[in-house]
Amino acid sequence: MPQTTVETVVAQARAAQVQFETASQEVVDELIVGLAWAVIEPETNRSLAEQAVLETGLGNVEDKIIKNHRKTLGLLRDLKNTPSCGIIRELPEQGLVEIARPVGVVGAVTPSTNPIATPLNKTLNALKGRNAIILAPSPKGEAVCQRVVDLLQNVLRRSGLPENLIQKLSTPVSKEATHELMQLVDLIVVTGSQNNVRASYRSGTPAIGVGAGNVSTLIDETADLVSAAKKITASKSFDNATSCSSENSVVIVDEVYEKAVAALEKEGGTMLSAEESQNLQNALWIQGRLNQDLIAKSAAEIAKATGLQRPEINKLKLLMVEESGTGREHPFSGEKLCPVLTVYRAANFEDACRQIEAIYEFQGKGHSVGLHSQDETRPLKIGLKLPACRVIVNQAHCFATGGSFDNGLPFSLSMGCGTWGGNSISENLNYRHYLNIVRIVRPIPPVEPSLEEIFGEYWTKYGR
């Protein structure tokens, strides 16, 4: 079967989007629910998760099922009763009316680590704004992404809407086709490779890319160590650490270092010796690049592959390595995309913050930082000091950063990292980023200050 050119796919999307542009809020909201259910219906969700793990070799089935379900349910919660068509806000005292309009055709680049949840999340957000979307998945995730698109197109046909509102680039998806797509659409949203993020910003098309992960979490002397260890272990081991929000390092204040490490070991971690750490490093990086055969594998699989001898090897959840340096000569200070946790010792809270800053100067700047502490002043201190767009307090990091039912962040699989991470946004990517907002501006009684009101205090202090 001949490939459909990128130009043709975009033209089909434009024609479909024109038809969809005048859909009512009721039509849009019903469609969103139907699209979501087509993927997270339990049997379908399991089948997709099994296919994703089989074809990508990344993560594990049970966790992907949970991720697909919870991320989608959370997004539906966020989108429910949220206006995205026509008038969305009126501010009569300011003479303003806000109208939501589509951005048009969205090109969405998605990673192999989340080949179901991320395409679905981007699709629901895009169609909430009455846009069309074209998915450009990574090669490993292409087949399962095609199946997701087929399921979603069935819902469109059943709803009497054009199936080309949701498309995927023709198989095989190439780097060249993805870059051509970037040139032709109205908005690009990129999750995954930093090369793709940078290419999107260079394309000349409005783009939203998200930064690299390499999350560090601080455990201070006031922390509930049992709770911290449970949450860090659950987060770092979930889906074999495929999430960019998984902890890659933990910086522990000296006063509680041994107790914190013991708590992590009780939850299924094991601290490697210097020799074992070197063996792991030799296996995990090949010529400076992560070994594709080990990323997103379980701790037990990695341990066996590196010859680690432990009686409890099949029960291991985390492999822990001690580190003091950062940078290319210290690869454990970077993102590992597997259940390997780097452990740093810091003299005190201020020293721990300095250590995290050094880690982020190497990798992960702008993303987010975790804190386990009972000191209510410390989250603000971190927020005012460290280059991170989210400070996640006493939570399992990978569950919390992309939105959770027990925090106020919007559900998302794409976290903006601000200018620190080379991104155009510093918040979680959400449906509002897929909208053009038109403002009707009417005259109001003038609100013009006198010179005295503006300059009075300054004149009093410094004179005129």
Image (cartoon, helix red, strand yellow):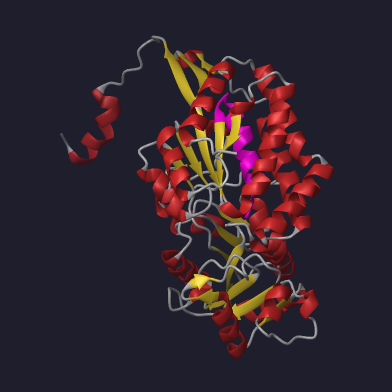
Q: Is residue 231 above or below residue 187?
A: below
Q: Look at the image and tell me in which quarter the C terminus lies.
A: top left
Residue 67 x/y as whole percent: 72, 50
Question: Residue at position x 44%, y 57% from top?
Answer: 387
Snapshot quadrant of residue 306: bottom right
Question: Residue at position x 56%, y 51% from top?
Answer: 138
Residue 324 x/y as whole percent: 50, 80
Q: Is residue 119 above or below residue 231?
A: above
Q: Outermost residue, right direction?
A: 43
Towards the viewer: 87 or 51: 51
Towards the viewer: 388 or 108: 108
Do we see residue 108 in this rendering?
Answer: yes
Residue 113 within the magenta-colored segment of the rendering = yes
Left or right of 230: which side holds 332? left
Question: Residue at position x 58%, y 57% from top?
Answer: 244
Residue 46 x/y as whole percent: 80, 49
Question: Residue at position x 58%, y 88% from top?
Answer: 274
Q: Is residue 63 above or below residue 290?
A: above
Residue 286 within the magenta-colored segment of the rendering = no
Left or right of 345: which side holds 209? left
Residue 323 x/y as whole percent: 53, 80
Towards the viewer: 269 or 9: 9
Q: Is residue 116 above or below residue 152?
A: below
Towards the viewer: 56 or 364: 56
Do we see residue 417 in this rendering?
Answer: no
Q: Outermost residue, left direction?
A: 464
Chain part drawn in magenta: 112-132
Q: Look at the image and tell me in which quarter the N terminus lies.
A: top right
> Looking at the image, how many numbered discs can be counted on the residues?
0
Q: Outermost residue, front direction?
A: 1
